[in-house]
Amino acid sequence: MKLDNAIKGVLDAEAALAKRLLAVGERHAADHDVYHLGHTLARQAADHVTRLTPFAERYHMAPPAPPHAGDSHGILETLRLKRSQLMGRAESAGMLLLRELRETYLLAQATEIAWTILQQAALAVRDGELLDVISTCHEQTETCAKWLRTRIKETAPQALAAG
Amino acid sequence: MPDRIADIWGRRTPYGAEARWPVRVDQYLEDGVAEADVEWVRSACVLCSNGCGMDIAVHDGRIAGVRGRATDRVNHGRLGPKGLYGWQANNSPDRLTEPLIRETGGRLRPASWDEAMSLVAERSREVLAERGPLGMGFYNTGQLFLEDYYTLSLLVRAGIGTPHLDANTRLCTATADFALKETFGSDGDPGSVTDIDCCDTIFTIGHNIAETQTVLWSRILDRLHGPDRPRLVVVDPRRTAVAREADVHLPIRGGTNLALLNGIQHELIENGWVDRAFVDRNTVGFDRLTQTVAEYPPERAADICGVPADDIRAAARVIGGARRLVSTCLQGVYQSHQATASACQVNNINLLRAMIGRPGRAVFQMNGQPTAQNTRETGANGDLAGMRNWQNPEHVAELARIWNVDPLRVPAWAPPTHVMRMMRYAEEGSIRFLWIIGTNPAVSLPELARIRSILRQKRLFVVVSDAFRTETTEFADVVLPAAMWGEKTGTYTNHDRTVHLSERAVDPPGAARPDMEIFLDYARRLELTDKDGAPLIKWRTPEECFEAFKQMTRGRPCDYSGLSYDRLRGDNSGIQWPCTDQTPAGTERLYADHEFNTATDYCEDYGHDLLTGAAHERKDHSAMAPAGRAILKAAHYLPAHEPPTDDYPFWYTTGRTVYHWHTRTKTGRVRRLDAAAPEMWVEMSPADAERLDLAEGDLVRVESPRGRLKARVRIGGGRDGVVFAPFHYGYWDMPNGDGDGGSGNGDGNGGRDRARAANELTITDWDPVSKQPLVKTAAVSVTKVTEGGAQAR
Ligand code: SF4
């Protein structure tokens, strides 16, 4: 049985996604929805890791280090305002945002397919508990990708066709 | 008549269930004007979404007073203080009477219409040539007339071809619009104000009806003080006049509406207070909802919301026992964390109990502004005209056919751009032309320092049309003087879909013009044409525009095809859409047959994920196949983005007072209204005041990570830990409040020491679905500056 492989696949993908969502949120803090949802979804990805970790042991995988998902706090606000006035004023901000959202979307897709793979394996070994966790997390990951898709569809015209 | 400043709701005229609400005509004429000497002109009030029918008194070519119309279905003759006195703003001496152009030196100088409009058109052509339609933005209001909006919608969507058109309704009713679309498939409040007359229970959350819609509150008060008193459940962190009448009052923590509503639904389901036959037949999503709210037993909801679990149970028991339930919500839901998700739960509560489409059974996703409904119907905000679905190519093609333009001309690749995003585009420099119409973002948008810094940019050309100079006109390159209500003819629609006609009673002052005429002039100058080369906009008068609009709505939820100006002049004062040849008297309630607007081909929107705002696409909607059933949407509570901390220990919430409207551009110019609430204040609980050693009238500094303000303290009955600030006060009427950016220091806030606008402190954050800014969720600190002096009141 090589379920540890599929679990590791999900854990790595979620950790990478969480890290990227945080980074994009921070870099594009002047796009306030990207900042807030980036943090919320990064926390969600981190939570997925926490929920899957107990199964790593069950399937003999070395436990991963918990990923870090930051919180918003006051001082950032001031920094963010300044940044929005400096970097946020650059017209290239839209192009940069589009590129990073696209990369994040691909990570979300990679995470989604990792969950699908794990789900198939969990079905085959008839692990009901694992399937419960998968079903929530998988759906949330799909929604995360869908949000990125929505945001990309809104961003692309302004970044590419204005000016 | 008694002084209606002190006696806001007037004399009680109690009535029992299913009786007719008694008529009480409220009238106010200027001193020295006799009733015999005035001519009455038909209109309706434009100072809140209730849309009370009123007549305007004209004397010597001026507006000299108003009276409520006894036969009107909405108000039965009544008017509230804003309606009675607000018209005086029309006559104020500082109306804008000529266009203004900013000189190189920075001052605004008078100009002719031709000079001003040439400049606006020339700059538009330049931006269009350099950057294309995506370089152009338009931000309007919830206070124009239907005809103004529809002209603007066609002009911008099919003429300019940009998705960047939004209205300040984004700040007030975007969530109502989206919650209705999510649950029922389309916008349009299902109920009727007459549902108040026959309900036995009222559930209201985050809606200070007594101050926001005073005449609606009079109607409710008359039921509460009559026989068969309806029971009343109120959710509001403040002990408002509404809360004081309640059977159950839940003063919950800010930002926790969703947890409470999930808790109430938990109880409804747990105790079997659900109409299962209705739910099975007429809704989808019940299983998911049950699973979600199962995690919110009253104890958990009580923990999150900071109210006793037994009170949550009591509220659920009242709602669960209702036989005729009217639910309402407003800004306490719409401007808070998880706005659309929470508003959808209010819809759910009525659906679980089959409280929809029948007398006394209604849910009101309330509007704030008087004509907000029309921005949504015409597509002058975040919707497509005629409640069409921007993701449905058939709908877009139909609109293009009606407008006689190529379907590709209509920007439908994404939802219309919301105002906060438009501001972001202006900030990064991809929008270079911004026309602000009848609204005052320099006071009403969140995080004012940021907004001012965006509007002040040299590379952004700002046009402002308004009736007065405002904090926003101080950033304008061109200012255009607009006619107000009473000075133009047009229609508008209130929150229960009642359409009124308002006739021109007097001429606009000086060279001021109706907004529709300004847009027509602009379209002519830009030579906007349809696909055959004929002028894009085919009408010249408001009535012609209305005729075109009503054809455009044929077959859509907001069907106006049976209406006309003549019918609106008839004996029936106020007619509710849909109004067709088959239903000429209008339609009192939507969904009387429990068939909702959710068929995939018909619906206005495919819906969203409530947590992220991820847009569902056609395939998702088809897969769900609601096909005429209402959609029960479920969501989990999440903590707000900016909870109180050690440095900023108070929850900051902004709101309204009964005497003022928006940024006081009108009400601040009416002596009685202004005198009733002349000064900015903040409200705190007695316990908090005591802890900070504050007495009524002390001056405090309130600070958030984004800004600060100074105001006097009122000690009220609100929740501990909450600071309330009215959002009406800006800088135009402060000493030295005009001129250079409103301040003399170029920062438009009266200088650091004089900052008083509530939005100096608010956070730039919006609901992921409705994109409504969350101006009720921020953390602040409070410091005493000086004691006493002038009383806050
Ligand atoms: S309730 Fe609203 S519409 Fe009616 S008079 Fe008052 S402000 Fe005007």
Image: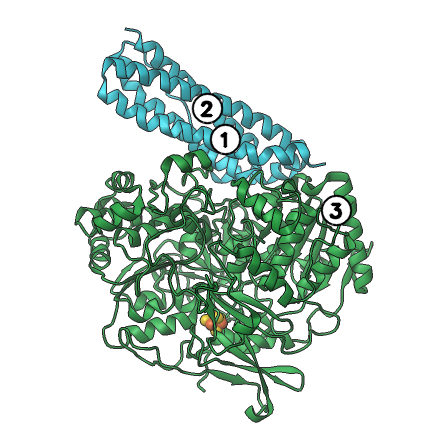
Chain colours: A cyan, B green
- Pick out the residue farthest to the left: B271
- Dot 2: element: helix
Question: B182 left or right of B135?
Answer: left
Q: Report how far apart the C-alphas of labels 3 and 1 lie in the structure.
A: 33 Å
Residue B625 coordinates in the image, percent (x, y): 37, 39
Nearer mark to the viewer, of 3 and 1: 1
Numbered circle sitting on residue A148: 1
Instruction: Place residue B93 in its image quadrant.
Output: bottom right
Instruction: Reply above or below: B739 against B776.
Output: below
- Mark 2 and mark 1 residues within 8 Å of each other at the beta carbon: yes
B384 or B427: nearer the viewer: B384
Label 1 Cα crowd, 10 Å radius (few <14 / some 14-19 / many 20+) = many
In the rendered image, is residue B453 in sight? no
Numbered circle sitting on residue B458: 3
- Dot 3: element: loop
**First of labels 2, 1 by sequence position:** 2
Question: B643 left or right of B224?
Answer: right
The subunit carrying tag 3 is: B
The subunit carrying tag 1 is: A
Residue highlighted by disc 2: A108
Q: Report how far apart the C-alphas of labels 2 and 1 lie in the structure.
A: 9 Å
Which quadrant would the N terminus of chain B be assigned to in this image?
Answer: bottom left
Residue B204 coordinates in the image, percent (x, y): 33, 60
